[in-house]
Image (spheres, rainbow, N blue to C red):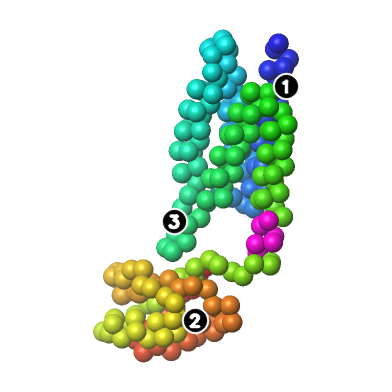
Amino acid sequence: MDWVTLVQIGVAAALGGAVGLERELGTQPAGLRTHMLVSIGAALFTLAGAEFLRGGDPTRVAAQVVTGVGFLGGGAILREGATVRGLTTAASLWVTAAIGLAVGLRLWLAAVAATIGAVAVLWPTKYFEREVLPQRRALEATLALEPGAALDEVETAAHRVLPRSKVLRVTHSDAGQALVVASEPMRDVSLSQLAERLRTIPGVRGVELSR
């Protein structure tokens, strides 16, 4: 019936929006509208597949939806030095597509349960991860070197300040050389203290720290 199809599309939009709202509030690149569109699209492809196949297997179309969402999620993933960003957003898009597929197949309970589970993972779990668990994000230090500075000596001194570290790259530009080092987080030392220690290394004229 036509009204059932309209209900399915509406439910898919609402459930996708519930997941996307958290991403929107977190100022992520893929937010409310993106998740709603992904859920609607997945539901519509599933409905179209079921109508076209007429008694066949609609999951044949659903499998192609999952592949397409994989490309969309890949675009949300960014690598910034030692840190990879966007994995959670990519995963939320993947789950949202699955929710849309479930709605298209009229698996109402599974779709609602998956939405509640996804929101619970994205919202309360994020607070727990930030406030209760120790910081696990890698620390990246960019050391701007003075002209003529001995690179190997600066690297050795940086390892003394950041014992669990490794050199990511060495850059050369008009502004001079720079040494980029990644390190495991140090819970007992603040970023300002680390920056001051790195700044005192002979041959270092500037320090930039980021997580």
> What main secondary structure does the magenta stretch of the protein show?
helix
Q: Which numbered disc flags the more N-terminal residue, 3 or 1? A: 1
Locate the N terminus and report the quarter of the image it occupies. top right
In the displayed structure, would residue 85 be above or below residue 49?
A: below
**Region in magenta:** 125-130
Cα distance in 3D space between marks 3 and 2: 23 Å
Q: Residue at x 54, y 24 (%)?
A: 59
**Pointer 2: residues within 10 angstroms few (<14), some, or many (20+)?**
some
Q: Residue at x 54, y 84 (%)?
A: 193
**Pointer 3: residues within 10 angstroms few (<14), some, or many (20+)?**
few
x, y percent for residue 107? 68, 27
In the displayed structure, would residue 93 be above or below residue 177?
A: above
Q: Which numbered disc flags the more N-terminal residue, 2 or 1? A: 1
x, y percent for residue 106? 68, 23
The numbered mark at residue 7 is 1
In the displayed structure, would residue 44 be above or below residue 122?
A: above
Provide the secondary structure element on which disc 2 rests.
helix
Q: How many marks?
A: 3
Q: Say which quarter of the image contains residue 134.
A: bottom right
Q: Is residue 124 magenta?
A: no
The residue under label 2 is 195
Q: Kindly indicate whether the residue at mark 2 contacts the one at mark 3 (C-beta within 8 angstroms).
A: no
Q: Between 52 and 195, which is closer to the camera in this rendering?
A: 52
Horizontal side of 30 relative to 157 (left or right) equals: right
Q: Residue at x 45, y 38 (%)?
A: 71
